[in-house]
Image (cartoon, helix red, strand yellow):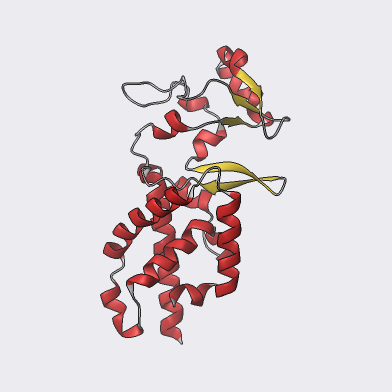
Amino acid sequence: MLRDILIDKELFKNLREKALESEEGENSSKEVELLEKAVFKRLKKKRSVKKYKKLGVTKGDLKEIIELADILSLDALGGPSNYEIAKEHQEWCTICGRCCRESESIFIHKDELNLLLNFNPELKKGIIPNKLFPEHFELKDIQPCKFIDPETNKCGIYHSRPQVCRSYPLVLIESGGKARNIINLRSTCNYSVNLILEKSMILFDDAIRRLEEK
């Protein structure tokens, strides 16, 4: 019910199918399922359906809102973008190190290459053309990233790290011949879970407001 207030049912269905299909390399259906369960556990504590029972709100509405938060950047509805939310809440990162150990490619934009090498000249032999976007670059032999400290999980080139590292849990993918950022939906990443949770709360509050105004 609540999700239908925010977006047409058929439009949502088509958008979700396309999003999950194009993101399959980064976000498997199993990972998405686990992420949504992790967010649901937190969301039902943050937004109690009992408070809105008279409006017909159920736990099913919470799940539907989370499914929308997975695929939709809130700037499409006049809200903050995924990047803006993530940038404002860097405290969500617990420095678990999984992103540095499990990432399959560290993307380096051609415009940041010289800056990266100025601060880290030893990287020159470890940078190769990007497989998907040959005009750009990536680090080779990066799983795990050789710059992660095995004891502290901190980055050895943190202050000059590539933009893709700065933007995580947003990751760059190829979709329709173009590059775009998506959220890496990992249930084991506190940053990802909290990002979807924050978006879900914003969407929930907006839907409730519209429902009460009817």
Q: Position of residue 206 (x, y in %)?
A: 45, 72
Residue 163 in the image: above or below residue 147: below
Q: What is the quadrant of the N terminus in the image?
A: bottom left
Q: Nearer the viewer, residue 177 or 147?
A: 177
Q: Which residue: 55% across, 72% down? A: 7
Q: Position of residue 150 (x, y in %)?
A: 35, 21
Q: Residue at x 38, y 43 (%)?
A: 189
Q: Nearer the viewer, residue 102 or 90?
A: 102
The percent position of residue 85, horizontal first and vertical second, equals 47, 52
Whether 119 is drawn above or below 158: the answer is above
Say whether residue 73 is left or right of residue 199: right
Determine the residue located farthest toward the front in the rendered image.
Answer: 30
Residue 4 in the image: x percent, y percent?
A: 50, 76
Q: Quadrant of residue 102?
A: top left
Please name the residue shown 43% across and 49% down the image: 30
Up/down of 53 relative to 194, above or below: below
Q: Residue at x 46, y 62 (%)?
A: 67
